[in-house]
Amino acid sequence: MSVLNSFSLKGKVAVVTGAAGLYGKQIARALAEAGAKTYAASRNIENLKTLADEFKKDNLDIAYGYLDQGDEVSVLNLKDEIIQKEGKVDILVNNAVLRTMKDWNDDASKFEKSMQVNATGVFMITRAFGDIMAKAGSGSIINIGSIQGMIGPDATLYEGLNFHSFVPDYFFHKGGIINFTRFVASYYGPRNVRCNCVSPGGFQTEQHPEIFVKRYSDRTFLGRMAQADDIKGIIVFLASDASQYITGANIPVDGGYTAK
């Protein structure tokens, strides 16, 4: 196989959770553009319908299904639905995240809800689809972390602004998913199922004040925040045979933020 062909996902079936989000759209599009039959999963079916319509205009093969990641019945229903239609799953991207907390002083019930979806839920869906891949003897699981799972919050980025990053549940889960990646890589490795983590940096949106964008950009080597296509390449690489000897890794995609 030529090196370029090793990046192709033709004939593969991929599942992306949280596919209607900022990074989720990039991830789903990247997999579909590389040739995978891509299933977008989320609680928001209307957003998924809109996403599917956009992709189909570009002749991309995408389907969608309902997923409440905090509910194991929903997880198993999605798995059964896809297996019934496709007979296999080759790629799982754990991208969904529920942002329940806004502040350190929020009621503890919000942390508990976050645990149900972002910790227990990630475990449940990884086990459900990972076991399918293990039976087949191949597969790639990609966890979407964050640089906020690698470093602490920088209060200076938010001085004088009406938002901040002191949300304890998010830092807890994004740190935990990095080591969960290593566990899954070890558990499924003997059955040729790989598991890696991608930790993106901040994604620039129209809502970001100019001063925040400048402060953040100055913290990176590349002098900018993440844009609309920045995560696509690493996703296709980790999903494809081009990365067949890579597992248990955490790869920052952050313009050098965590290396500076």
Image (cartoon, rainbow, N blue to C red):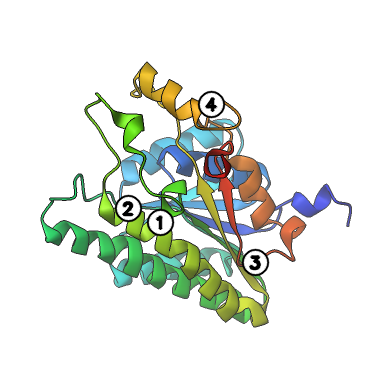
Mark 2 or 4, nearer chain start: 2
- Does residue 20 lie above or below 5 as drawn? above
Q: Amino acid at mark 4?
A: Arg
- Residue nearest the viewer, comparing 99 with 132: 99
Residue of label 2: 170
Q: Which labelled disc corresponds to residue 247?
A: 3
Asked if the residues shown at circle 1 and circle 2 are in contact, with their CB atoms under 8 angstroms apart, the answer is yes
- Residue nearest the viewer, comparing 134 with 203: 203
Q: Amino acid at mark 1?
A: Lys
Secondary structure of residue under mark 3: loop
Determine crowd level at label 2: few under 14, some 14-19, many 20+ residues with C-alpha closer than 10 A: many
Q: Amino acid at mark 3?
A: Thr
Q: Residue furthest right?
A: 2
- Does residue 163 lie above or below 39 as drawn? above
Question: Is residue 67 in sight in this rendering?
Answer: no
Residue of label 1: 174
| Res 216 → quadrant | top left
Q: Amino acid at mark 2?
A: Tyr
Structural distance between the alpha carbons of marks 1 and 3 = 18 Å
